Image (cartoon, helix red, strand yellow):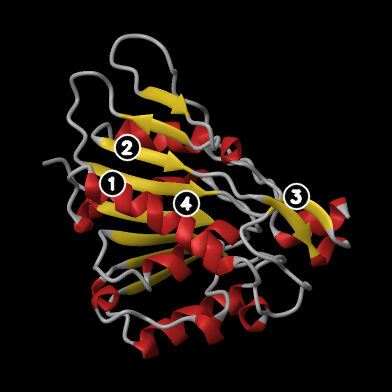
Amino acid sequence: PAAAVAAAGGSVRTRVSATGMAGAGAPRVSRDASQTVTIAPAEGTPHTATVIGPIHGLGDTNMGWADAAMHIHSQLPHVKFVLPNAPVVPVTLNGGMAMPSWYDITSLDDRTVQPCAGIEESRATVTALIEAEVAAGLAHDRIVVGGFSQGGAVSLFTGLQYPHALGGVLCMSGYLAAQEKFELSPAAAATPVAHFHGSDDPTVRIEWARRSAEHLRAAGVKEYALKEYESLGHSASMEEIADVVAWLQTRLPPP
């Protein structure tokens, strides 16, 4: 089962050092009853944009991406990061063993055609986080949804069905899951998508990423950028994280 988790895109630690969490000008970090981690701008720094994510993958938790989020926040100090935790549920791929998962994965075959039971509930979870930011006063175009692997799939599935154009959708080593259930919202066609993917990924194959990009462009997504990283497997490199930062700086610039 452990090998299957790794193969399905489980716990992946990015090779990025954490930014210090204490001291003058440090972000305000909190965890609520649902174990959602929030990295908010430091006292005195206006909060003018939010990233829902990076949303973690199968078998991982939000702590697997907390260091990377802290690093990215250090480059975007006006941005709040909200990192949710997936529910612990049985996963068919792993013989029904319960683990953090945003939806069921039945096999290592083409994921785009699997039923992905539970993905609608996860979409509702992420949508509620978006709505909370809107209710707090943020414009839709100041919100980005993004994640890694299964979290990237949930980001595409949620962000591109959301009834308003967002600031962007970020997908790292992910794919469009549950294609038969997916319907691009007219407004979301204008939401820019940045998809970063290792060309040597043995878990979420690069062909699935390319097909997802083709499918969503054909569906009407106006801006879908897929960048491939040679020799990168199912992981995130320093180069990729730097590209994520650069993209977020264009999508969520300081006011």
Residue placed farthest to the left in the image? 255
- Which mark is in front, 4 or 3? 3
> Residue under circle 3?
99
Give x and y (percent) for residue 219. 37, 88
Callout 2 touching callout 1 (CB < 8 Å): yes
The kind of residue tagged 2 is Lys
> Residue under circle 2?
80
Residue 70 occupies quadrant: top left
- Counting residues from the start of the chain, the first of labels 2 and 1 encountered is 2
Q: Residues within 10 Å of mark 1 (few under 14, many from 20)?
A: many
Disc 2 and disc 1: Cα gap in Å? 10 Å
Disc 4 and disc 1: Cα gap in Å? 27 Å
Residue placed farthest to the top in the image? 23
Q: Quadrant of the C terminus?
A: top left
> Residue under circle 1?
133
> Residue under circle 4?
240
Give x and y (percent) for residue 240. 47, 51
Residue 149 visible in the snapshot: no
- Counting residues from the start of the chain, the first of labels 2 and 4 encountered is 2
Give x and y (percent) for residue 108. 77, 72
- Which mark is in front, 2 or 3? 3
The kind of residue tagged 3 is Met
Q: Nearer the viewer, residue 235 or 255?
A: 255
Disc 2 and disc 3: Cα gap in Å? 27 Å
Disc 4 and disc 3: Cα gap in Å? 27 Å
- Which mark is in front, 4 or 1? 1
Disc 1 and disc 3: Cα gap in Å? 28 Å
